[in-house]
């Protein structure tokens, strides 16, 4: 780590430290809301070791995650985590610091390969057995940067791409992940465990994956920053796939600064030789002649507490009234969204109404076809990299057969109709797909490209915008294994089809449930989005005013009847916190007023309407 980078980390620590101090909480976890910069400063001074930090996170996970009424965000702890932490401490004492994540515990979604003693299953028993033989590029980059890989997080099985009726946060291996703001609430999206774990302070940062919504949606639901990078900025080599066209590995963090630090470590600045996208440009730029730019080594240089001053932002409210006229967005939610937008102008930004100008942000019209076609081919290629698991060397047909043979544990709540759909598609890229109105794969690719160019890029360029902004998604719903997910609105499809980046940042709350906004840009615009998001964070401090309570239910006030209100009865928040260990006090945070919303996606216009609306909101 260079002296310049070390200095920037210290400055960042001083800038960000007031955020954590603002939170009013009785949770006495010694590293509550601690940032990467703060922890690095303490380790550099000798006041803290990576071993102590890692052990504290492990104890907190045992107290608040793996207990009977816990969050259930962590699917597996790394048995080598403390040994890795000790090695990082030894290196630091010898004067060798590998980078800004040196000694920092990081959790990885359980679809990211690690060549160690941990499983990479995507939540399915079909991938359980012998661990991967090679690290993913992401895991290799983390190790090279000195991070402590603490464990794996639970997810929606197969990244929520098995069934139209799937429930976010449920997997056959991991069970149901819950939301740290209220155990009855859903954590949203396939990276549900990653978002919930970061929010619950189970690690300093965590990594998830997004195809359409599954970094920003959990970030929104659990009140953390969700940074979804440009396709190809982070490698998918060694990641269980949905689609090489849209998949990316992203970050969940409690501050924009921590997300920026982590992106600099995990990204591929040049081709890694295992994922062609790391040497190219995403779909939205293909055919434009625009080359892949030289990307920064350090994204913390773009943090700016005044990042909104003078910015020109395009606002869209498309879909925010609800996808279904029979399920409109509740008035308190729309009021919170408008308050979040007002904070932009209060901070010095100029807003342009893109809806009035006629732009379409409903999403790529060929998206579901593209994902299905890619999935069948891409998952076969991934299965070829695995040994000692039921589907090793197999195909999607083998995964379907495995699920049918183990339906009691793999399909107790929902089926695999999405797997079946993908497996039934015609094999040629120019073959008409009968389930998609006769559109072919290549036609779908072109339609998604054109949607991106004619709406997202056109708006950014013609209106001279720094970014497009919208609410991320509706606040987290109560988990419902009978009726499934309850998406009312969502916006991640604006960026999904073209492969463009998003930064979701906490922006408010409704009855203590987080709500956030998303900043969208063209490919490789992460520096600008980080500047804007950090500026918004600096003027709102939304998460700091609304930390998780681990309550059994939220809202938890004004819900008891006269006979339930006995003298001296503890609150739902206090009861939840009492299940913790000595690292957590017996009463919890008193909710105040802020945080993000869940990321979702607008559905392709031509595909399977109601079902497609749902499935394209948590991938």
Image (spheres, rainbow, N blue to C red):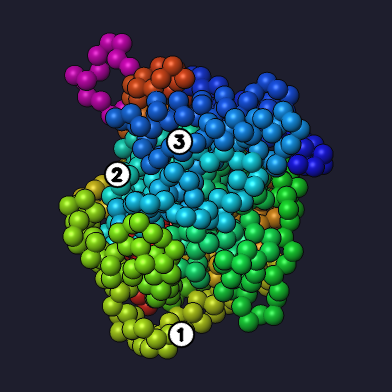
Would residue 333 appear left or right of 461 to someone viewing this image? left
Ranked by sequence position, the earlier of labels 2 and 3 is 3
Which residue in the structure is indicated by mark 2? 175
Residue 479 sits in quarter: top left
Q: Secondary structure at mark 1?
A: helix
Q: Secondary structure at mark 2?
A: strand
First to last magenta residue range: 556-571
* Distance in Å between CA atoms under marks 3 and 1: 48 Å
Judge whether residue 266 can be spotted in this image: yes
Ranked by sequence position, the earlier of labels 3 and 1 is 3
Would residue 17 appear left or right of 361 to someone viewing this image? right
Which residue in the structure is indicated by mark 3? 79
Circle 1 crowding by C-alpha within 10 Å: few under 14, some 14–19, many from 20: some
Residue 5 bears which disc, if any? none
CB atoms of marks 2 and 3 within 8 Å: no
Residue 443 bears which disc, if any? 1
CB atoms of marks 3 and 1 within 8 Å: no
Q: Secondary structure at mark 3?
A: loop
Please provide percent x and percent y for residue 245. 50, 71
Residue 125, placed above or below residue 92: below
**Does residue 568 show up magenta in the picture?**
yes
Quadrant in the picture for the C terminus: bottom left
Q: Residue at 64% of width from left, 59% of height from top?
A: 268
Quadrant in the picture for the N terminus: top right
Circle 3 crowding by C-alpha within 10 Å: few under 14, some 14–19, many from 20: few
Mark nearest the camera among 3 and 1 is: 3
* Distance in Å between CA atoms under marks 2 and 1: 38 Å
Q: Residue at 65% of width from left, 38% of height from top?
A: 102
Q: Residue at 69% of width from left, 60% of height from top?
A: 269
């Amino acid at each position: 780590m260079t002296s310049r980078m070390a200095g920037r980390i210290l400055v960042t620590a001083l800038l960000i430290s007031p955020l954590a101090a603002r939170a009013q909480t009785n949770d006495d976890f010694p590293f509550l809301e601690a940032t990467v910069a703060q922890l690095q400063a303490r380790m550099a001074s000798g006041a803290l070791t990576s071993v102590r930090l890692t052990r504290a996170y492990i104890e907190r996970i045992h107290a608040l995650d793996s207990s009977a009424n816990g969050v259930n965000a962590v699917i597996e702890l790394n048995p080598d985590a403390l040994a890795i932490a000790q090695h990082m401490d030894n290196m630091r004492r010898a004067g060798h610091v590998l980078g800004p994540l040196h000694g920092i515990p990081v959790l990885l979604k359980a679809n990211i390969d690690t060549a160690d003693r941990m499983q990479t299953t995507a939540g399915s028993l079909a991938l359980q057995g012998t661990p991967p033989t090679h690290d993913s590029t992401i895991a290799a980059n983390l190790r090279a940067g000195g991070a402590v890989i603490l464990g794996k997080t639970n997810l929606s099985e197969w990244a929520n791409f098995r069934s139209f009726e799937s429930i976010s946060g449920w997997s056959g291996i991991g069970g149901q992940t819950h939301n740290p703001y209220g155990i009855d609430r859903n954590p949203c999206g396939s990276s549900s465990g990653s978002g919930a774990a970061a929010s619950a302070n189970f690690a300093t940062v965590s990594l998830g994956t997004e195809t359409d919504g599954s970094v920003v949606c959990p970030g929104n639901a659990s009140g953390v920053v969700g940074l979804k990078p440009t396709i190809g900025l982070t490698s998918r080599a060694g990641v269980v796939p949905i689609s090489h066209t849209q998949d990316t590995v992203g970050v969940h963090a409690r501050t924009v600064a921590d997300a920026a630090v982590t992106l600099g470590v995990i990204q591929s600045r040049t081709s890694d030789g295992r994922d062609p996208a790391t040497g190219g440009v995403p779909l939205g730029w293909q055919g434009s002649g625009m080359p892949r730019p030289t990307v920064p080594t350090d994204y913390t240089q773009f943090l700016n507490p005044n990042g909104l001053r003078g910015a020109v932002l395009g606002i869209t409210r498309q879909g925010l009234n609800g996808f279904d006229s029979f399920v409109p967005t509740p008035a308190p939610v729309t009021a919170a969204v408008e308050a979040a937008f007002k904070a932009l102008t209060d901070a010095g930004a100029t807003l342009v109404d893109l809806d009035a100008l006629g732009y379409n942000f409903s999403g790529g019209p060929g998206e579901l076809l593209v994902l299905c076609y890619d999935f069948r081919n891409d998952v076969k290629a991934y299965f070829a990299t695995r040994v000692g698991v039921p589907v090793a060397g197999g195909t999607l047909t083998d995964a379907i057969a495995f699920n049918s043979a183990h339906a009691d544990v793999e399909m107790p709540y929902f089926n695999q109709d999405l797997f079946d759909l993908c497996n039934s598609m015609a094999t040629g890229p120019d073959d008409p797909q009968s389930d998609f109105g006769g559109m072919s794969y290549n036609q779908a690719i072109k339609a998604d490209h054109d949607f991106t160019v004619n709406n997202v890029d056109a708006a950014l360029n013609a209106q001279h915008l720094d970014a497009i902004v919208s609410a991320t998604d509706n606040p987290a719903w109560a988990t419902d294994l009978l009726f499934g997910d309850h998406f009312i609105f969502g916006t991640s499809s604006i960026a999904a089809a073209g492969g463009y980046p998003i930064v979701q940042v906490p922006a408010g709350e409704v009855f203590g449930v987080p709500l956030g906004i998303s900043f969208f840009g063209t490919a490789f615009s992460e520096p600008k989005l980080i500047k804007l998001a950090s500026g918004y964070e600096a003027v709102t401090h939304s998460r700091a005013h609304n930390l998780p309570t681990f309550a059994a239910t939220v809202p938890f006030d004004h819900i008891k009847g006269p006979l339930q209100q006995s003298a001296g009865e503890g609150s739902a928040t206090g009861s939840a916190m009492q299940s913790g260990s000595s690292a957590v006090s017996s009463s919890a945070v008193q909710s105040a007023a802020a945080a993000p919303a869940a990321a979702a996606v607008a559905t392709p216009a031509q595909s399977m309407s109601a079902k497609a609306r749902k499935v394209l909101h948590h991938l």
